Amino acid sequence: FAPVDTGGLREGGRRQQPESPLYNRSLTGEQARQALISE
């Protein structure tokens, strides 16, 4: 478990919705940060 800042409520909430790179995936903190950079 690692915290990853996905942004403010509006923007960050969208990054955690279905069809996003982070949704329902087991990722390390670094993998999640890389997925956010790649989007």
Image (cartoon, helix red, strand yellow):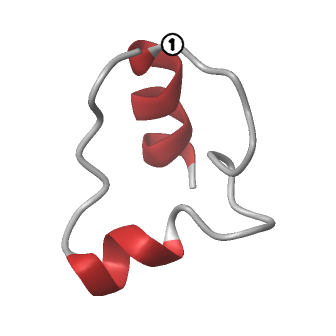
Residue pointed to by mark 1: 28
Q: Can you give x and y, in whole percent of width and height, for residue 6 in the image?
A: 31, 54
21 sits left or right of 39 in the view: right
Report the front residue among 18 and 33: 18
Residue located farthest toward the front when viewing the structure as drawn: 1
- Residue 27 horizontal/vertical position (percent): 60, 20
Residue in the image at 68% along x and 49% along y: 21
- The residue positioned 69% from the left and 61% from the top of the image is 20
Residues 1 and 29: in front is 1
The image shows residue 27, relative to residue 13, as above or below, that is: above
Disc 1 crowd, CA 10 A, few/some/many (<14, 14-19, 20+): few
Residue 24 spot, x, y in % from top left: 75, 44
Percent position of residue 28, x then y: 51, 13
- Badge 1 marks a residue whose secondary structure is loop
- How many labels sit on residues? 1
Q: Residue furthest right?
A: 19
- The answer to which quarter of the image holds residue 9 is bottom left
Query: Disc 1 marks which amino acid?
Result: Thr
Q: Quadrant of the C terminus?
A: bottom right
Q: Taking 4 as reference, is 18 above or below it?
A: below
Quick check: 20 above or below 31? below
Q: Residue at x 55, y 44 (%)?
A: 38
- Residue at 23 percent of width and 63 percent of height: 7
- In the image, residue 38 sits, relative to residue 19, either above or below, namely above
Q: Quadrant of the N terminus?
A: top left
